[in-house]
Amino acid sequence: MSQRERIAAIDALLPQTQCSKCGFDGCLPYAEAIAAGEPINRCPPGGEATLVRLAALTGRPVEPLAEPAQPPLAAVIREDECIGCTKCIQACPVDAILGAAKRMHTVIVDECTGCELCVAPCPVDCIDLVPHPTWQAAEGEEERDAYLARRATLGRTRHRARQARLAREAKEKRLERQKRMMQQRRPGGSGPAAAGPAVKRQRQMALKAAEQAVKRVQQQLESAQRRGDAQAEATARTQLPEAERLLAEARSALEQSQST
């Protein structure tokens, strides 16, 4: 089994709550860490069942869980106490909270993984964690297993979609910032700014930012290829030409300022 296949197999066993209780930023990073030798007993939402499966897959001994096992939970916002600060929305790793600034927020229970990450940021402590109603309503082991499988599939899909959205928004902000820096104008004029020391510094900063953007996209592409994440790889390949174009523009602008 290759390293990529090993990571995918480990990730398939994790509950996809994206809770970070393992010490890593989500289930996939923890799967990568396990493949690299990290302990397999750091997943409270997975509990004993996941621990046993991980032990069988990796050939490691079953050790006691680092933290007590956690049953499936759901977050519930006491809406009459919510002040609309959006901090829980920003913290949710699967975008399962609806709301807007200064407006009441609510949890989409069917999409909530019970990660608890929304609780700590709430400044008015109006979020409760309760047993997930679907888990409670399940009759028998078969229905409970089916719920856990659905939660894992949905949690993985929504977490990846959120990561892609955040990366896209961050990229758009970086590109806009680079464009502003490269399009400096004379006060009150429409032509290119005079190539004085200040302009040269600005263009040097723009070039550095463009180089970092290209490097970041290349790293994302390499990481996606190592993980075998086709969606992330496609996103990185789409972003790379634009980042390289802006880098070329930044280099050209700096060269022009140095020649004047």
Image: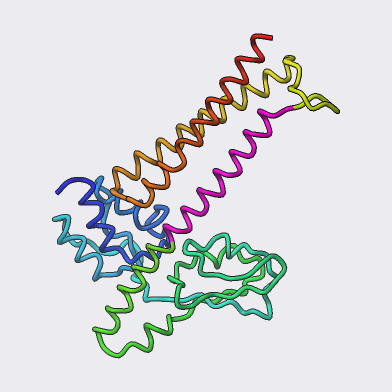
Q: Among all residues in the image, which is located at the extreme right?
A: 188
Q: Is residue 99 magenta?
A: no
- Residue at the spot 62% in from the left edge and 74% down from the top edge: 126
Report how many numbered discs are placed on residues in the image: 0
Residue 123 at x, y = what percent?
A: 66, 65
- Residue at the spot 56% in from the left edge and 64% down from the top edge: 120
The quarter holding residue 62 reads bottom left
Residue 81 at x, y = what percent?
A: 68, 77
Quadrant where the C terminus lies? top right
Residue 129 shown left or right of residue 13 in the figure: right
- Residue at the spot 28% in from the left edge and 84% down from the top edge: 143
Query: Where 130 sits versus 179, above or below?
Result: below
Q: Which residues are magenta?
A: 159-184
Residue 235 at x, y = what percent?
A: 42, 47
Residue 170 at x, y = what percent?
A: 56, 46
Principal SS element in the magenta part? helix
Query: Where 43 sits versus 2, above or below?
Result: below
Decide which of 30, 246 is in the foreground and name it: 246
Decide which of 121, 254 is in the foreground and name it: 254
Q: How is the image coloured?
A: rainbow
Residue 25 shown left or right of residue 80 in the figure: left
Query: Where 78 sits versus 22, above or below?
Result: below
Q: Among all residues in the image, which is located at the extreme front?
A: 190
Residue 101 shown left or right of residue 228 in the figure: right
- Residue at the spot 86% in from the left edge and 28% down from the top edge: 188
Q: Is residue 172 magenta?
A: yes
